[in-house]
Image: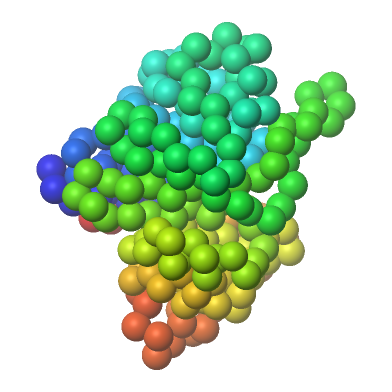
């Protein structure tokens, strides 16, 4: 294996198979996700990366961690919360920090959003975050999580030089297609994988709109259907 395989599982949930054969799950939300195709439910994982604590990003994290034995990477409050639920393999970190997990270099970045879980009342789960992941072949991805556009995306581009950015485009709760296109240009990426769109009517941004805003930039929009894999 020498290429990255990206599978969209609906909303902001992804399964990545790295060039070295590692299985990564980002923001696992399958149960109750209207866009999730059950036939695509992951059966294995080496790493689970969680950007923030909202249920549409973390709802299946504990079950997947227990079922696969994967190591969960997240901000301190999230890993502590999961630890209290019996999850053993945890890699807590915070913004600006870098770790090596399963042979991959992972850096936690800022994100502009909120982070909590409704569990008999609102439970605070730390700040929202994004991730830079450097793969075995030197390719670098940026998973932005749920976020607004913020100026330090230029710094993220300068520091880490990501090749691919996973960016929310749904609007209302995150960036829309126009500001996501601006983020992609600031980051200097070659390709954008749009996420956090089409799950509910409230999320009005579309990959086609993103493509229009990126017209002439040379940045490719990877348009996937839930359950579809690109490599």
Question: In this image, 152 relative to 43: left or right?
Answer: right
Q: Residue at x 66, y 45 (%)?
A: 128
Find the residue positioned furthest to the left.
1
Rendered image quadrant of residue 149: bottom right
- Residue 22 appearing in the image: yes
Q: Residue at x 51, y 40 (%)?
A: 97
Find the residue positioned furthest to the bottom.
216
Query: Where is residue 136 drawn, in percent x and y?
Result: 22, 44
Residue 165 to residue 31: above or below: below
Which quarter of the image is occupied by the N terminus?
A: top left
- Residue 201 appearing in the image: no
Query: Where is residue 90 drawn, in percent x and y?
Result: 49, 21
Query: Where is residue 180 drawn, in percent x and y?
Result: 56, 71
Question: In this image, 172 relative to 135: left or right?
Answer: right
Find the residue positioned furthest to the top.
86
Residue 17 to residue 218: above or below: above
Question: In this image, 46 relative to 116: left or right?
Answer: left
Q: Residue at x 19, y 39 (%)?
A: 20
**Count of numbered tags:** 0
């Amino acid at each position: 294996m020498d290429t990255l395989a990206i599978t969209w599982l609906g909303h902001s949930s992804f399964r990545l198979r790295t060039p070295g054969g590692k299985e990564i799950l980002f923001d696992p939300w399958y149960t109750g996700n209207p866009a999730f195709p059950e036939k695509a439910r992951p059966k294995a994982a080496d790493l689970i990366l969680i950007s923030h604590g909202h249920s549409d990003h973390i709802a299946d994290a504990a079950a997947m961690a227990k079922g696969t034995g994967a190591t969960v990477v997240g901000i301190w409050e999230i890993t502590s919360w999961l630890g209290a639920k019996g999850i053993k393999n945890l890699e807590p970190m915070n913004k600006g920090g870098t770790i090596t997990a399963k042979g991959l270099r992972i850096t936690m970045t800022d994100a502009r959003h909120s982070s909590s879980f409704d569990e008999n009342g609102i439970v605070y789960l730390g700040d929202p975050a994004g991730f830079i992941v450097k793969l075995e072949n030197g390719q670098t991805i940026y998973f932005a999580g749920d976020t607004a556009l913020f100026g330090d995306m230029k710094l993220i581009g300068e520091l880490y030089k990501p090749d691919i950015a996973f960016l929310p485009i749904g609007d209302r709760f995150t960036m829309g297609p126009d500001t996501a296109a601006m983020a992609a240009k600031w980051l200097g990426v070659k390709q954008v994988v749009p996420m956090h769109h089409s799950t509910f009517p409230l999320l009005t941004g579309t990959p086609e709109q993103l493509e229009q805003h990126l017209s002439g930039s040379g940045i490719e929009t990877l348009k996937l259907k839930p359950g579809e894999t690109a490599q």
